[in-house]
Amino acid sequence: MVEARAKLRNVGISPKKMRLVVDAIRGLAVPQALARLQVIFKRSAPVVAKLLKSAVANAQGKYEVQIEDLLVKSIMVDKARDMKRWRPAAFGSAHAFRKHSSHLEIMVVSRAGAKFSSKDKKQEKIETVDLTKTDKKAPTHSLDTKAKNTEGHKKIFSRGTKLAKGKDNLNVKKG
């Protein structure tokens, strides 16, 4: 049996409002649930639809299963931490209120008798190379910069060259 989950935490919608949408799709087949979520006019409907698609993608990533063979087994909406806020009131006072948020978890399972197979992750062989037995040698660089400062090799980013002083650089006239 294929089983996959998806979780979304700290959604800025109260659990009471979220449960109105969640109760409408609990126990349905995934295509029917997605079709129903498109016509529900609530702020939490797109959030639930996106999480349901994520749970389906988790199932398809782990197993080779069709979307028509998946059911919404369980959806849980839990209360998350409230944000405490203040609202101005009469005579310069303030009243406290809370902004509610929620956690959402969806689990999808395959239907009884649905065909599925587990995806095997291919193990790629890593080729190792013995660098001690190569014919070519690595080029050696000398640390002496004065030896390389010839007419063919100019230092570009130092004070002692013509390019850095601007004499040879695009015939710039100094005024």
Image (spheres, helix red, strand yellow):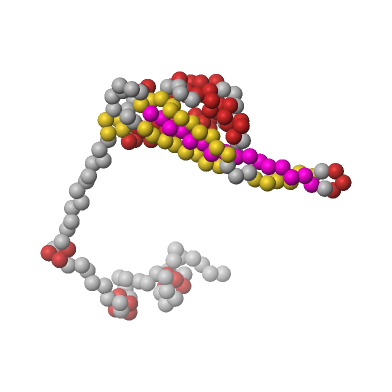
By secondary structure, the bulk of the magenta-drawn segment is best described as: strand
Q: Residue at x 46, y 23 (%)?
A: 27
For the image, the number of numbered tags is 0
Q: Is residue 107 magenta?
A: yes
In the rendered image, which quarter is residue 63 located in? top left
Residue 47 point in image, percent of width and height: 53, 33
Q: Nearer the viewer, residue 112 or 21?
A: 112
Q: Is residue 58 magenta?
A: no
Asked whether, in this view, residue 71 is left or right of residue 125, the answer is right
Q: Residue at x 58, y 26 (%)?
A: 20
Does residue 67 appear anywhere in the picture? no
Does residue 131 appear anywhere in the picture? yes
Residue 111 point in image, percent of width and height: 35, 23
In the rendered image, which quarter is residue 82 located in? top right
Specify the quadrant that holds the C terminus.
Answer: bottom right
Q: Residue at x 30, y 77 (%)?
A: 143
Specify the quadrant that holds the N terminus.
Answer: top left
Residue 113 higher or lower than 162, as above or below:
above
Residue 161 point in image, percent of width and height: 41, 74
Asked whether, in this view, residue 39 is left or right of residue 169, the answer is right
Asked whether, in this view, residue 28 is left or right of residue 2, the answer is right
Residue 151 point in image, percent of width and height: 31, 73
Q: Residue at x 72, y 42 (%)?
A: 97
Q: Which residues are magenta?
A: 94-109
Residue 12 higher or lower than 150, as above or below:
above
